[in-house]
Image: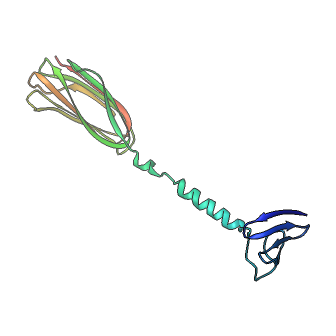
Amino acid sequence: MAECRFEGYRSISRTNQSWNVGGNKNQPFTFNNKLETTNPKSPRIMKNPKPRLILLTIFTALALMVGCDNDDDNDVFADVTINEGPNGDIGGDFTGNGGSTSQTFEYQNGLATADYNADITASAGSIFQMIVRDADGTVVLDRSLNGNIEPDSFSGVTSSGTVGTWSVTINLTDFNGDGSFSLSEGD
């Protein structure tokens, strides 16, 4: 028989099938192997918690700590990157996954016109627009391409404008795809 001290009681000991606790006035309490008292009037020392309650508590805690991130639908974007220019020529690439953007870039055009080129590979509903303004701010080109509709490219020469700092605005609307554009001094 093992024996040890237990707070508030003189001793606690275990036989094969039960625990015996000696109280303050040598009043023994008998417990079964689960340390639950067999005497309904005696105090509870320890009770086995229910496994379902433990699992529910752990599951609830995990659910609160680990949330579902469903922001994938909000991560749409459209972007334009310049990879040449800004003196005489300007060009870049654009891409998107359903987002929209409008970006304007300036470049130096020493001639009164510009040669332009653009092509896209995009899904239906995607819109690409290129607007070119001369040094006075006059629109010398305004062309668009729609995704999944022919033609998927355009090229040519702008209207004549004032020499100096020109600008090109690239508008992507609900753009899902990629493409490129370029402008160079015309002849």
* Quadrant where the C terminus is found in the figure: top left
Give residue 104's quadrant in the image.
top left
Work out whether residue 46 or residue 117 is closer to the camera in this orientation and state it: 46
The vertical placement of 143 against 74, above or below, is above
Which residue is pictured at 13% across the width and 27% down the height? Answer: 159
Residue 151 coordinates in the image, percent (x, y): 32, 34
* Quadrant where the N terminus is found in the figure: bottom right
> Would residue 138 be found to the left or right of residue 122 on screen?
left
Residue 43 coordinates in the image, percent (x, y): 73, 77
> Would residue 130 be found to the left or right of residue 33 on screen?
left
The vertical placement of 124 against 54, above or below, is above
Which residue is pictured at 28% across the width and 24% down the height? Answer: 91
Work out whether residue 32 or residue 96 is closer to the camera in this orientation and state it: 32
Q: Is residue 49 in sight in this rendering?
A: yes
Q: Is residue 149 in sight in this rendering?
A: no
Residue 21 coordinates in the image, percent (x, y): 81, 72
> Would residue 90 be found to the left or right of residue 24 on screen?
left
Which residue is pictured at 85% across the width and 66% down the height? Answer: 13
Give residue 3's quadrant in the image.
bottom right
Work out whether residue 52 or residue 119 is closer to the camera in this orientation and state it: 52
| Count of numbered circles in the view | 0
Give residue 169's quadrant in the image.
top left
Residue situated furthest bottom in the rendering: 41
Which residue is pictured at 44% across the width and 50% down the height? Answer: 71
Work out whether residue 172 or residue 141 is closer to the camera in this orientation and state it: 172
Q: How is the image coloured?
A: rainbow
